[in-house]
């Protein structure tokens, strides 16, 4: 709230007695609903971010530099934020990982990859402009670098998975990381690599090795030979098909950590190889796609959505996640990642049985909080939206 003095801001906070009184006086609307009529960057509780630079480095991505309000408290490299974007009067929320070093707070960078079906990503690519203001949530996520740092770090990324990975690389290098850093990045082509220049600059540092593979140009996909080439300390020799480790490699192997973000096929390949070599505990992953348990719900039964504005809306269960069925019924539940990461689409199931797509577990207890995007109904289900 830039028009108030620092002393006043310390007294007039949302948690203070005066703050609670002001919030009650302005009910049913939040204080920020009034303040945004003056300036969307003047906020009481919500964090906002104003676009100060737009770069369309490739035909498939847009890089936004954002100035945040005081409510945003920064992030750890690898975490993600939820960005709220208003399109045709409707606010849509999506998860994006900052790509800047994690010492940034007031100014952050997001690189957003366009997806064929992506409403928000395509809108931002086509229409994002300097001066636009979006809502932004506190950063969250456990895909982060450990403290203390390992002496050897391997970063593997595929496609848009480069954003948390380049943030990790920038953070390590910017803070004088004394260890050995190796980066392995898979992109469709050089023209679709938003960080080609920076990766080339990182490769010039004596302690950093960068390997970029362009899959459409015949680049080699991840496999044992490539791991041997980019990170020999992760490649124990095989003896009778059983993973083993030479004594002279043991110290380096034990202190090596790998961080992976990319499409499911890359996760499967890396995960299988690390399991084969007995080093799965050295692998840390982030996957921005929904990985299911392989168990699907059968269609059948009726979904009943209790809403505050439309009363009860019913829909025949077609077996899809509840979020998709609610949208097909003309409802607009709040959501973010659509992958069970951000918990933005949580709602209360008042009765019925549901199945978690990630785990395959069923739950028939009443009055349970569920994530609409990763939950399917099993028979009749009542949801309080």
Image (tube, rainbow, N blue to C red):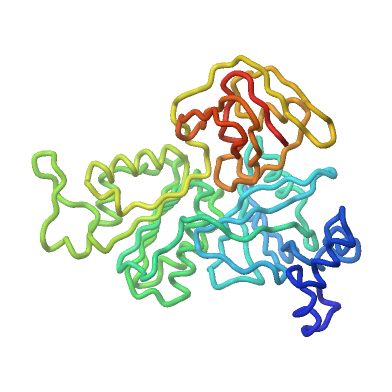
How many dots with numbers? 0
Q: Nearer the viewer, residue 297 or 218?
A: 297
Please give the name of the residue rendered at 38% of the width and 52% of the height, measured from the top-left corner: 284
Location of residue 183 (image quadrant):
bottom left
Describe residue 188's horizontal placement relative to residue 151 as left or right.
right
- Provide residue 120's location: percent of width, then percent of height: 70, 44
Residue 8, above or below 196:
below
**Extreme left residue here?**
240
- Which quadrant: the C terminus? top right
Describe residue 349's horizontal placement relative to residue 313 as left or right.
left
- Provide residue 43's location: percent of width, then percent of height: 79, 66
Residue 20, above or below 111:
below
**Extreme top residue here?**
300
- Provide residue 203's location: percent of width, then percent of height: 41, 65
Please give the name of the residue rendered at 19% of the width and 65% of the height, measured from the top-left corner: 251
Please give the name of the residue rendered at 16% of the width and 46% of the height, measured from the top-left corner: 243
Location of residue 144 (image quadrant):
bottom left
- Which quadrant: the N terminus? bottom right
- Provide residue 306's location: percent of width, then percent of height: 75, 31
Describe residue 137's horizontal placement relative to residue 263 as left or right.
right
Q: Nearer the viewer, residue 297 or 59?
A: 297
Q: Nearer the viewer, residue 363 or 86?
A: 363
Residue 382, above or below 275:
above
Please give the name of the residue rendered at 63% of the width and 66% of the height, measured from the top-left corner: 108
Residue 324, above or below 9:
above
């Amino acid at each position: 709230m830039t028009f108030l003095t620092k002393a006043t801001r310390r007294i007039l906070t949302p948690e203070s007695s005066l703050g609670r009184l002001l919030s009650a006086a302005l009910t049913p609307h939040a204080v920020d609903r009034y303040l945004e009529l003056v300036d969307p960057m003047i906020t009481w509780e919500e964090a906002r971010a104003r676009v100060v630079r737009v770069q369309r480095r490739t035909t498939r991505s847009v890089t936004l530099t954002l100035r945040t309000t005081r409510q945003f408290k920064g992030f750890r490299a690898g975490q993600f934020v939820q960005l709220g974007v208003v399109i045709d009067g409707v606010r849509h929320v999506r998860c994006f990982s900052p790509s800047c070093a994690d010492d940034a707070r007031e100014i952050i960078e997001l690189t957003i990859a366009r997806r064929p079906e992506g409403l928000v990503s395509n809108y931002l690519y086509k229409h994002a402009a300097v001066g636009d203001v979006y809502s932004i949530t506190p950063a969250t996520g456990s895909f982060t670098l450990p403290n203390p740092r390992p002496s050897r770090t391997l970063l593997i990324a595929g496609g848009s998975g480069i954003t948390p990975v380049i943030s990790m690389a920038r953070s390590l290098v910017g803070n004088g990381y004394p260890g050995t850093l190796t980066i392995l990045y898979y992109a469709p082509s050089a023209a679709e690599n938003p960080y080609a220049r920076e990766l080339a600059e990182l490769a010039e540092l004596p302690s950093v090795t960068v390997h970029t593979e362009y899959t459409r140009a015949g680049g080699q996909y991840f496999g044992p030979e490539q791991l041997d080439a980019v990170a020999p300390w992760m490649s124990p020799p095989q003896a009778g098909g059983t993973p083993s480790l030479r004594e002279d490699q043991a110290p380096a192997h034990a202190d090596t950590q790998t961080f992976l973000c990319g499409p499911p096929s890359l996760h499967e390949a890396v995960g299988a190889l690390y399991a084969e070599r007995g080093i799965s505990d050295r692998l840390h992953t982030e996957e921005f796609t929904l990985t299911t348990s392989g168990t699907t719900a059968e269609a059948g039964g009726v979904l009943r959505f209790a809403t505050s504005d439309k009363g009860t809306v019913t829909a025949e269960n077609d077996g899809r996640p509840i979020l998709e069925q609610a949208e097909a019924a003309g409802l607009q539940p709040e959501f973010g990642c659509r992958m069970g990461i951000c918990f933005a689409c949580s709602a209360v199931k008042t009765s019925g049985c549901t199945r978690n797509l990630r785990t395959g577990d069923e739950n028939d207890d009443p009055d349970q909080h569920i994530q609409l995007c990763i939950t399917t109904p099993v028979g009749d289900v009542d949801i309080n939206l």
